[in-house]
Image (cartoon, rainbow, N blue to C red):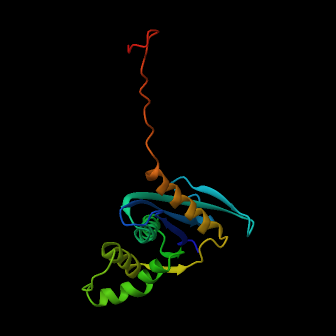
Amino acid sequence: MENSVEIWTDGSCPMNRGSNPGGWASILVIPESRWETIEENLSINYNKEDKKTYKCLEISGNDDTTTSNRMELTAVIEGIKKALELGFEEILVFSDSEYTVKSAMVWSLKWAKNKWHKKIKNKDLMKELYTLCSENNVKVEWVKARDGNFFNERADELAREEAAKLNEEPEEENEWIKIDMNNTFI
């Protein structure tokens, strides 16, 4: 369908203690009928499983103080927002986070009905996800992690790369000390 899109998401927070760097990624698998209408650079992915070529829009980002759950939620939210920006009307999101899937499809419905009175972790992201899902044709489904699914593996790779960007040690500048032939500092 021309106005439908699949989005594969993942989040990564290697230390996952609430104040550590993390990354997120969303891969929008663009239908062939829309390849020419998307002005952004699309990556070309060849899936060995089904022997098909796909054009995808990969988006990702990071946060220097976060958790794995926040990165998983952010990946879904940012993927949905990008799909809506591109004019897609039917959105199917795949996540390997049961927390994220249940947040989008079960828990947030209850919390919204109760006017969000309960103390809820990640309430800001939960409310945003609820709004995106309830006001648009969005479905979020669970997919098993690290099970060889091409797009799930690629999203995982991108999210890990984003987290690693913030975990990299800055290069230290070497301060060279100059000493002359008599061992005195210059």
Q: Is residue 15 left or right of residue 120?
A: right
Looking at the image, how many numbered discs can be counted on the residues? 0
User: Looking at the image, which residue is at 52% across and 68% down?
Assistant: 9
157 to the left or right of 130: right
Give how far across and how far down residue 155 sits, in percent: 56, 64
Residue 157 placed where, x, y %?
A: 57, 60
178 lies above or below 119: above
Q: In this view, does 139 lie to the left or right of 31?
A: left
Quadrant containing the N terminus is bottom right
- The foreground one among 3 and 168 is 168
Q: At 35% from the left edge and 90% from the top edge, which residue is drawn?
A: 110
Quadrant of res 150: bottom right
Residue 70, quarter of the rendered image: bottom left
Q: Which residue is drawn at 51% across and 61% down?
A: 159
* Residue 148 can be seen, yes or no: yes
Q: Position of residue 140 (x, y in %)?
A: 49, 79
**Position of 145 relative to 114 (above/below):** above
Outermost residue on the front side: it is 182
For residue 31, say whether it is visible: no
Image position, residue 40 (x, y; %) = 51, 54
State which quadrant residue 81 falls in.
bottom left
